C-alpha cells in the first residue's frame, strides 16, 4: 500500500480517536475542571505512549538528533498540554460536538504554516478543502449564535 494511503488511514484513525476522546473528556469533566482533566489525560497518555514506544521500536529513542528534539519538545508543549487544556475547556463549556467541529479547523492553521515555513504548495485539493472548512465553520458559528 502506498505511503499516502497509509497516511490517510492513520489520519482517519486519528480523527476517530480525537472525536471519541472528546466524548470521554466531556464525561470525565462533569465534576472536575479542565486542568485536572488535562493532567489525568496527559499522564495516561504518557504511560501508553511510553509502553508502545519501548515495545515497538525503542532504538530511535536514544538516537534522536538534538535539533529534532527541540522541534519535538516545542510540539509537545504546544499541542499536548496547552492544546489539550484549551480543547478540554472548550468541550466543557460549549459541548463536545461544537468544540470538536471548531477544532476541525486545524487544517487552516496547518496548511498556512506548511506553506509559509515548509515551502509546501497550495494545490487545488488543499484549497478546496480549506474553503470547505471555512464554509463549515461559518455555518457552525452562525448556528451557535442564532
Image (tube, rainbow, N blue to C red):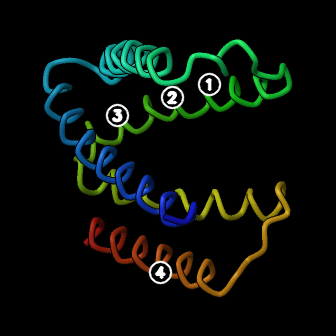
Residue carrying label 3: 88
- The secondary structure type at the circle numbered 1 is helix
Specify whether 46 is left or right of 146: right
Q: CA distance from mark 2 to mark 1?
A: 6 Å
Residue that appears at 78% across and 65% down = 115
Q: Secondary structure at mark 3?
A: helix
Residue furthest front in the image: 1
| Image location of residue 113, percent across then percent down | 74, 56
Alpha-carbon neighbours of circle 2 within 10 Å: few (<14), some, or many (≥20)?
some
Of labels 2 and 3, the one closer to you: 2
Q: For mark 2, give the secondary structure.
A: helix
Residue indicated by mark 4: 132
Say if 25 sits above or below 97 in the image.
above
Give yes or no for contact between labels 2 and 1 (Cβ–Cβ under 8 Å).
yes
Q: Nearer the viewer, residue 118 or 81?
A: 118
SS state under label 4:
helix
Which residue, given by chain and number where applicable, does mark 2 sit on? 80
1 or 3: mark nearer the eye: 1
Left or right of 47: which side holds 121? right
Discs 1, 3 touching: Cβ within 8 Å: no
**Label 4 or label 3, whichever comes before in sequence order:** 3
Percent position of residue 65, x then y: 82, 22
| Cα gap from disc 1 to disc 3, whole angstroms | 16 Å
- The C terminus appears in which quarter of the rendering? bottom left
Q: Residue beneath label 1, please?
A: 77
Measuring from the top left, give residue 93's x and y in whole percent: 27, 40
Amino acid at each position: 500500500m502506498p505511503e499516502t494511503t497509509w497516511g490517510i488511514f492513520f489520519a482517519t484513525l486519528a480523527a476517530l480517536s480525537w472525536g471519541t476522546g472528546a466524548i470521554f473528556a466531556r464525561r470525565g469533566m462533569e465534576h472536575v475542571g479542565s486542568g485536572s482533566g488535562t493532567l489525568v489525560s496527559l499522564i495516561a497518555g504518557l504511560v501508553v505512549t511510553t509502553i508502545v514506544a519501548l515495545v515497538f521500536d525503542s532504538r530511535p529513542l536514544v538516537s534522536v538528533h538534538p535539533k529534532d528534539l527541540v522541534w519535538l519538545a516545542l510540539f509537545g508543549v504546544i499541542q499536548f498540554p496547552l492544546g489539550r487544556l484549551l480543547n478540554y475547556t472548550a468541550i466543557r463549556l460549549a459541548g463536545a460536538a461544537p468544540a470538536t467541529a471548531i477544532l476541525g479547523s486545524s487544517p487552516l492553521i496547518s496548511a498556512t504554516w506548511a506553506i509559509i515555513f515548509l515551502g509546501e504548495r497550495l494545490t487545488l485539493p488543499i484549497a478546496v478543502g480549506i474553503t470547505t472548512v471555512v464554509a463549515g465553520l461559518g455555518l457552525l458559528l452562525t448556528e451557535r449564535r442564532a
